[in-house]
Image (cartoon, rainbow, N blue to C red):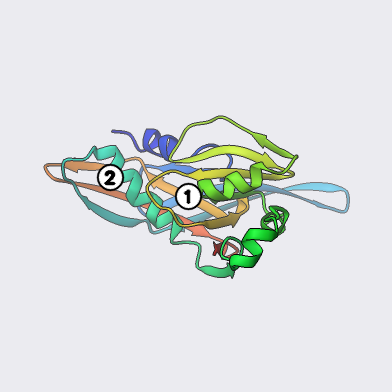
Amino acid sequence: MEIENIINSLFSEGLFNNIHYVNENPAIINSTKYIKVDQVLNKIETSEKYELDEEVIILNQRLVSLRVRESIKNKFLSLFENEIYFKYFKRGIFKNLFIKKDPNKILNLFKDKEWIITSVDIIHQLSLLNNFEYISSNGDIRLVGKIENTFIYKLCGLSTENIIYTGNKIDINPIFNKDIVNKDDLVKIQYKFISSGNLQKIIIK
């Protein structure tokens, strides 16, 4: 069982600028950026150390890979702490009978974001707009479409909540230790999501 394969099965491409896979904890992440000063391009190299969180997953009859993906997915979704509420479906009997829902109102909630992760019902509403483009991919958090400059991901699973998770590629920096302890009835994994704090969770009522 390799962590790269698990992550590829969990996330479709496009959510992150980069996913770091390391062989140690603490993890050392080296990066290079270029800054232009007085018409001269300067190369700046940085090195940062991160203490990865260890998670112990107790196994049952379900597939090991599925249990690990669910655990990582739940930790990922917990990053979206900034919550707002928006009324769209529960508008009252009169409005539901006589006033058509306008998906543009949903679109306006995230027009400045690079991606959203949401439910089947929200995706259906967005697909009613003329500029919605369908995209085919795989993953538990699956790329299914694009509207204007925003990529649309479907959150696969049993949840029926209409929630929109919004962000940009730069907002989350994932780090995973390649070494996985898998023995008897438990798995130990080490990883960390470095968050910018700009993530938002929109609860649609």
Q: State how far apart marks 2 and 1 are (Cα).
A: 19 Å
Q: Residue at x 60, y 64 (%)?
A: 198
Q: Is residue 198 left or right of residue 103?
A: left
197, 120: nearer the viewer: 120
Task: Find out whether the residues at labels 2 and 1 contact each other: C-beta distance under 8 Å.
Answer: no
Percent coordinates x, y for residue 105 in the rendering: 70, 59
Residue 170 percent location from the top left of the image: 62, 52
Is any atom of residue 109 visible in this view?
A: no
Callout 2: 10 Å neighbours few (<14), some, many (20+)? Answer: some
- Position of 13 with respect to 50 (left or right) is right
Q: From the viewer's side, name the closer residue of 117 and 18.
A: 117
Upstream in sequence: badge 2 or badge 1: 2
- Residue 174 is marked as 1
Q: Amino acid at mark 2?
A: Arg
**Residue displayed at 68% across by 43% down:** 128
- The furthest residue to the right: 39
The quadrant of the image that shows the N terminus is top left
Q: Secondary structure at mark 1?
A: strand
- Residue 187 point in image, percent of width and height: 22, 46
Q: Nearer the viewer, mark 2 or mark 1?
A: 2
Vertical placement of 7 versus 169: above or below?
A: above
Residue reaching furthest to the left: 184
Q: Residue at x 71, y 55 (%)?
A: 102
**Amino acid tagged 1:** Pro
From the image, tell me which residue sits under label 2.
Answer: 67
Q: Nearer the viewer, residue 7 or 148?
A: 148
Mark 1 neighbour density, 10 Å: few (under 14) some (14–19) many (20 or more): some
